[in-house]
Amino acid sequence: MDLEKTIIQLADTSGVSGDETKAAELALSMLKEYTDDCYIKNGNVIGHLGKKGAKPHILIDAHIDQIGFVVTYITDDGFVKISNCGGIDRRLLLAQQVTILGKESVTGIVCAIPPHLETDESSVPELNDICIDIGMTKSQAEEKISLGDKIVFSSKCKKMQGDRITGAALDDRCGIAAILRSLEIVKDKKLNCEVTVMFSTQEEIGERGAKIGVFDIEPDIALAVDVSFALTADDSELKCGKMGKGCMIGFAPTLDKELSGRFKEIAQKNNMPYQIEVMNGETGTNADRFSVNKSGVKAVTLSIPLKYMHTPVEVISVSDVENTAQLIAAYLEEVGV
């Protein structure tokens, strides 16, 4: 597979929390390259591989949804009022180009006062005060847009220097790409474990798809493949991973220490680049839902370093996605033996 192309194709397909259909259908079509036993259930993309009934039963998950907005009202002047779906940084909203996913796609601009007229440059407007200008009257808008329609940033993925990509929704479409790549690596190899792949919905609004998915699947072990903070010029090395340095293996009270340690050992044994991510409580990922499912599931986070999270210009390194995939594949090859 062309990993870079796969990441971009996934990230450029819309799938706001609660309305992930297009992204899910694309991911399902890609998953079918590796198993015929795959489908969409309650929004989640599910696929089964490996030795059915074997122990352990491993769940590999990445979330399919992205942050975005929802239409809440159309004013008499034709402006669109919005609310958020997921964690939005209001500081960067003004003057952004967005796409409203109505009866047809409608381009809009988040209203912004020109700096020449701004009296309080330090103010950050509340979402309730923000409007989108679509250049239509109210009646024209109502022909194309309905209350409840989702909205996404209009930015598409672009290549940067080296192997870096920037764009919206790389959180967590790059995680899906890493899982698909791991399946390609092991597709001609015998697995001695049962494997279920899940691309889960609504992570950005409370890990809802993961909660129902893991309850139904009942795995013994769960791998949450997500993104985490990559170091930027204005942040601390104590809090962030580094781009190009490999997968970030999570250690946290809510994760299984033995499982985290095993991934560290596999990386060391295979001379794979890796980083340790230490968290002092919950991880903020689907692993938090997995670890408390029924009587408990051994869970670990495998994170891809990402800059500028929850913005239209997220940045990743393709090599980190590849190294995450290689680590997953190496684990699948040895587990159950």
Image (cartoon, grey):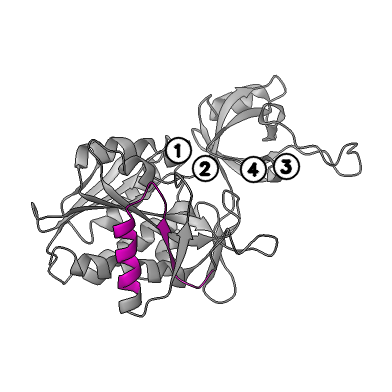
Residue bearing mark 1 = 17
Which residue type carries mark 2? Ile
Which residue type carries mark 1? Ser
The percent coordinates of residue 113 (x first, y second) are: 82, 38
Q: Given the current orientation, which residue lies at the most extreme bottom position?
A: 271
Tell me which numbered mark, 4 or 1, is placed earlier along the sequence. Answer: 1
**Residue 128 covered by magenta stretch:** no
Tell me which numbered mark, 3 or 1, is placed earlier along the sequence. Answer: 1
Residue bearing mark 3 = 94
Residue bearing mark 4 = 89
Q: What residue sits 24% from the left and 37% below the top? A: 215
Which residue type carries mark 3? Leu
Task: Using the rendered view, name the quadrant where residue 294 is placed.
Answer: top left
**Residue 249 covered by magenta stretch:** yes
> Over which residues does the magenta segment extend?
243-267
Instruction: Work out whether residue 301 can be spotted.
Output: yes
Near mark 3 (Cα within 10 A), the count class, few <14, some 14-19 or many ≥20, is: some
Near mark 4 (Cα within 10 A), the count class, few <14, some 14-19 or many ≥20, is: few
* Distance from the alpha carbon under mark 1 to that under mark 2: 7 Å
Q: Given the current orientation, which residue lies at the most extreme top position?
A: 76
